[in-house]
Image: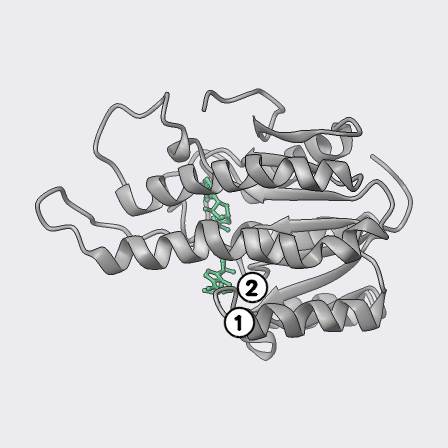
Amino acid sequence: MQTRSRHCLVTGASRGLGLEFTRQLLALGERVVAACRRPAGHPALTRLAAEYPGHLHVLPLELTEARSRAELLREVEALWGRLDLLLNNAGMLVSGERFGSLEADAFRQSFETNALAPLLLAEAALPLLERGTSPCVAWLSSQLGSIARTEAFYTPSYAVSKAALNMAAKLAAAPLAERGVRSVLLHPGWVRTDMGGPAAPLEAPEAVAGMLKVIDALPAGARAPFLDYRGEPLPW
Ligand SMILES: NC(=O)c1ccc[n+]([C@@H]2O[C@H](COP(=O)([O-])OP(=O)(O)OC[C@H]3O[C@@H](n4cnc5c(N)ncnc54)[C@H](OP(=O)(O)O)[C@@H]3O)[C@@H](O)[C@H]2O)c1
């Protein structure tokens, strides 16, 4: 594990994997902006801010709103003037979808949240990332976005949006790499969070520790390989 103090931005930090990324990065000595919709509404983040004074800033982000993304990046610019790691983690899943009663809004919202907004955030963060040390964008994807692995009609709005995220990240990988920014698409495993549900076999600490190792092991010039939390490649 690298020991320098990186400047990290984590989206969707209110709970689940985003909160665990925040915890583990702080424990490693990194500096973190934890972005979430209601910064004051999460006691776990408030406790972490007290435990790591000066290292954690909890800032507002409604990922799908351009103004909110821009305001967040302005704050990061004012705080640090640079960014070493963007963890594009926030995401949503609409459950209970059935072929025969699909709702267009579920697809629109999922595409906007899971694919388009992370792409626009990474694009807008590029000037900050360019000033970072070994900068990296990590995109939280899912094996459900793997077309090669799809055999049944399951979580369609989520699966379609994560497949779109994979393409968005792959496209962005080239201009990011040209400016010295590594990137990776990560499948965290099936993890016990609000999204993963209680039957999931993996706990967030193990999934996040694995993903942080994968990020650290990424070579310079990495252009969005699609890897799981153990570093194993997934088929597109
Ligand atoms: N858990 C799994 O098994 C699993 C598997 C594969 C991939 N993933 C991916 O891993 C990432 C994290 O998943 P998770 O399990 O931690 O999910 P989670 O427990 O449902 O948490 C989702 C996070 O995203 C935030 N979020 C959603 N929409 C947002 C928006 N429009 N603006 C700002 N924040 C928003 C939520 O904020 P609020 O608290 O405000 O709602 C929350 O912090 C997601 O991208 C997910 O697709 C998870």
| Lower sequence index among marks 2 and 1 | 2
Looking at the image, which is closer to me, 25 or 87?
87
Looking at the image, which is closer to me, 73 or 150?
73
- Residue at image position (64%, 53%) is 123
Looking at the image, which is closer to me, 171 or 234?
171
Measured along the vertical axis of the image, is residue 42 above or below residue 127? below
- Residue at image position (35%, 59%) is 109
Density class for disc 1 (Cα within 10 Å; few <14, some 14-19, many ≥20) is some
- Residue at image position (27%, 50%) is 95
Left or right position of 135 against 226: right
SS at circle 2: loop
Ligand 1 within 8 angstroms of badge 1 C-beta: yes
Q: Quadrant of residue 201?
A: top left
Residue for badge 2: 14
Left or right position of 169 against 45: left
Density class for disc 2 (Cα within 10 Å; few <14, some 14-19, many ≥20) is many
* Mark seen at residue 235: none
Query: What is the residue that sits farthest to the bottom in this orientation?
Result: 40
Kindly identify the amino acid type of the residue bearing the numbered disc 1. Arg
Q: In the rendering, at what x and y percent does residue 99 appear?
A: 13, 42
Labelled pair 2, 1 in contact (Cβ < 8 Å): yes
Q: CA distance from mark 2 to mark 1?
A: 8 Å
